Amino acid sequence: MIYLDSAATSLLKPQCVGEAMAAAMGRCASPGRGSHESARLAAEVCWDCRCAAAELFHVASEEQVVFTMNATHAINLAIHSLVGPGDRVVISGWEHNAVVRPLHARGAVIDVAAAPLFDREGTLEAFARRLSGARAAVCTHVSNVFGFILPIYDIARLCKAAGVPLIVDAAQSAGVLPLDFQRLDCAFAAMPGHKGLMGPQGTGLLLCHGETKPLLFGGSGSLSRERDMPAFLPDRLEAGTQNVPGIAGLLEGIRYVQSTGVEQIERCERSQLRLFAAELGDSVGQLMLSPDPSLQSGVLSLLPRDIDCEEAAELLGQGGVAVRAGLHCAPLAHESAGTLRSGTVRFSFSPRLRRDDVLLGAKYTKEILGK
Ligand code: PLP
């Protein structure tokens, strides 16, 4: 199988990730819940992972790195911390349901800063027009459907000037593009551990800067006499026993990203996308490519010719090419791009793919959809 679905989850993990998980299963007990060797080892794994994440994302202190079970959990925590019923929240036109649904559930007034696909200036103008008086802003760093890299540092600057706290959804950029939390100077950045960071499913991170409100209440291994959750991070947001095997795997994933280099990963995914697109040309339909390659990460949508998207993905899957089709949990992004009715077929790339895999993926796609 040629796996071109890394935007969903990075299946092609470095081997050390699984090995670290298996080792943690055998050796690590509950972190912060005992002074014996195996509890200490578990605490060490969690601390090392916090340190590695803090270093990779330039977070001032390790305590600001909170473990979550995925990006959705992290985004829910951030929204719960900042947004109440009736609050107006500005979001980009490329947000995932992991943003839209929690805001809707919270009773927020969702104000979409709509702009055309791959239009950085238009996006900035749309945010600038809406920020005054907003309670918060949420913006994805990279669209999970089209790979559009949003001008997140400029948006953060606009938010800062308007006094509006910003939540960055880094689900598609963590481990794939450089991300500097201190330079962003935003309230939160949420990310999965299981995509670009190469960790296992069931892991995620929330980088915090400012007021936080717990979503879950329970044991934290600290201040046990108190009825309230501790006021300090990360304990405030980490109720219950941690996913230590997952965190052990995530630590190895982050180390892989660090040793490979995020800039190298970014270059690699971008060149795979361009190679794949060049091989395909317009043979099977319309590729949604940015005219400026620097505005697109390793995620590419296709509007196939003469065939429904879901059917195309089904045929590709049967032919050995793993892709995702439909709305990709992001109907707003499709509405923004005018593809809500059809959906798209999405191809996504990975530093774990070889050039030959990319070429073979393009060849099979042409053969299967070009008939
Ligand atoms: N945000 C974006 C942009 C995504 O692409 C995804 C997952 O595809 C999520 C949020 C949710 O991530 P998770 O499945 O880890 O909760």
Image (tube, rainbow, N blue to C red):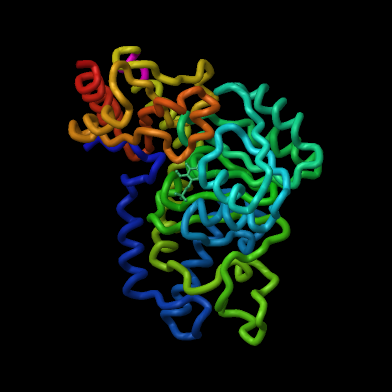
- Residue nearest the viewer, comparing 368 with 349: 368
Say if 177 sits above or below 186 in the image.
above
In x, y percent, where is residue 241?
47, 73
On whether residue 279 falls in the magenta region, the answer is yes
- Residue nearest the viewer, comparing 1 with 350: 1
Please name the residue shown 37% across and 45% down the image. 10
Image quarter (top left, top right, bottom left or bottom right) of the N terminus = top left
Left or right for 23, reference 217: left
The image quarter containing residue 357 is top left
Please name the residue shown 55% across and 31% down the image. 149
Q: Chief secondary structure of the magenta span?
A: helix
Say if 36 sits above or below 78 in the image.
below
Please name the residue shown 47% across and 36% down the image. 144
Q: Is residue 276 visible?
A: yes
Image quarter (top left, top right, bottom left or bottom right) of the C terminus = top left
In x, y percent, where is residue 92?
62, 34
Please name the residue shown 68% across and 37% down the image. 111
In x, y percent, where is residue 134?
76, 42
Q: Give the range drawn in magenta.
A: 277-281
